[in-house]
Amino acid sequence: MSAAKGLYAAGAVALALVPPAMALANRSSPLVVVVAALLFGLGVAAEEGRGALRLLLRPLGGAVGAAVLGFLAWCLLSFAWSPFPALSLRTLSEFGPTLVAAYCLARLAPGRLPPWTPPLAAGALVVACLFVVASLRLGMAPQRLLGQRDALFVFNRPVLTFVLVAGPLAFLVFARGHRLLALGLLLLTAAAIVSSVSGAAAMGLIAGLAMAALARLLPKRFGLALVGTGLGLALVLAPVEGDILARFMPEAIHARLEHSSSRARVAIARSFGAAVAADPWRGAGYGTSARFPEVPAAQGLAPELREMLAVGHPHNSFLQVWAELGILGAILAAAVLLLTLRAVAILPKAPFAVALGLIAAAAAIAFVEHGAWQAWWTAALGTAITWLRAGLARPPKSDTA
């Protein structure tokens, strides 16, 4: 038992260090999450023996688990027609281990975190936010001192991680009685996001806070309807997003969003949408976006459309699912999202609002951000879900002593 507690303590420290690790090295979270998951896995194995495997496998027999497994099976099956199987495998080798680690962490860590974990994790996020704000105010001098790139966008991944993690972690801290700390955590995270140049992070922050507030104030069915409609439209309209924006987006908005390359993003969406129309049924194959100008569906496109495919991703994860996995992949993704909402619907009102806020923030970011299969993104989502589930778990006795 003492060995298991030691492993849990080490895993909790690793989990708490995700935000500062990302602030220092913006691709580091997958390694940190894998380490944390391994520590908790070893602890549960020492404590439960073979029961640890049953703990991990039990949710996979439910509706959400079956939908997720079906989606992942379709991803693997698409290797059969991927024109670049080595690229598909390389993408999976980054995404797959992080996904497994994130799932194990979210499944095993809640209920086993030491009592001091919430304030430690809050302090770590505070340090990460202060580091980002200070670096930006100092003209990226700390990055030059550390021998790192001093471009402002190096903090995009860290602040996107902060967006996802802050709400669930504040909920956990609040649930353990540290109310002022929870409020300060949210305010400081918002300050770091606003200080950064990441429009996606600001968009996620606004969407998450607005949805959490609405879900807290309105009956559950309205919150579920709002999020479900938003997710459904984002997925269904993804192949024609570029055409819709090209026709109806006012020039004044493009002018205001010039720093976000909005015109280029619309052109990219039109190009990938045209490729989806050329092969809507099965897609080009998992992980092929990096070489999309060379896939069969792109060969008949006009030269100006093929040129925009060379960016390597459609800047929209919903559209990426369509382009790589076709209509069946989109249907399976829709099933995962809707069944997740059904599972969230049974939560008590406060965690229900936090969960919907997390989903709204993640969806808003996924609508405009980089590739769907990036390991750092998967690690951030896994960390956020772990904190949310920890807030739902019964606290250790010493937490309330």
Image: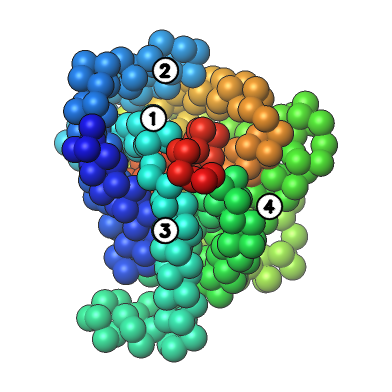
- The answer to whether residue 226 is left or right of residue 313 is right
Q: Which of marks 1 and 3 is nearer the N terminus?
A: 1
Residue at numbered disc 3: 120
Q: Which residue is drawn at 41% across and 63% down?
A: 124
Q: Is residue 114 visible?
A: yes
Give the class, few, some or many, for how many residues have Cα within 10 Å of label 2's Cα (few <14, many ≥20): few
Q: How far apart are marks 4 and 1 (CA)?
A: 26 Å
Q: Distance between the residues labelled 4 and 3?
A: 24 Å
Residue at numbered disc 1: 107
Q: Distance between the residues labelled 2 and 4?
A: 29 Å
Q: Do the residues labelled 4 and 1 touch (CB within 8 Å)?
A: no
Q: What residue type is labelled 2?
A: Pro
| Rendered position, 340 above or below 11 | above
| Rendered position, 131 above or below 376 | below
Q: Which amino acid does label 3 sit on?
A: Leu
Rendering quarter of residue 125: bottom left
Q: Residue at x 26, y 86 (%)?
A: 145
Rendering quarter of residue 73: top left
- Mark 4 or 3: in front is 3
Q: What residue type is labelled 4?
A: Leu
> Is 36 or 396 nearer to us in this picture?
396
- Mark 2 or 4: in front is 2
| Rendered position, 126 above or below 383 | below
- Give the SS element for disc 4: helix
The disc at residue 59 is 2
Give the class, few, some or many, for how many residues have Cα within 10 Å of label 4's Cα (few <14, many ≥20): many
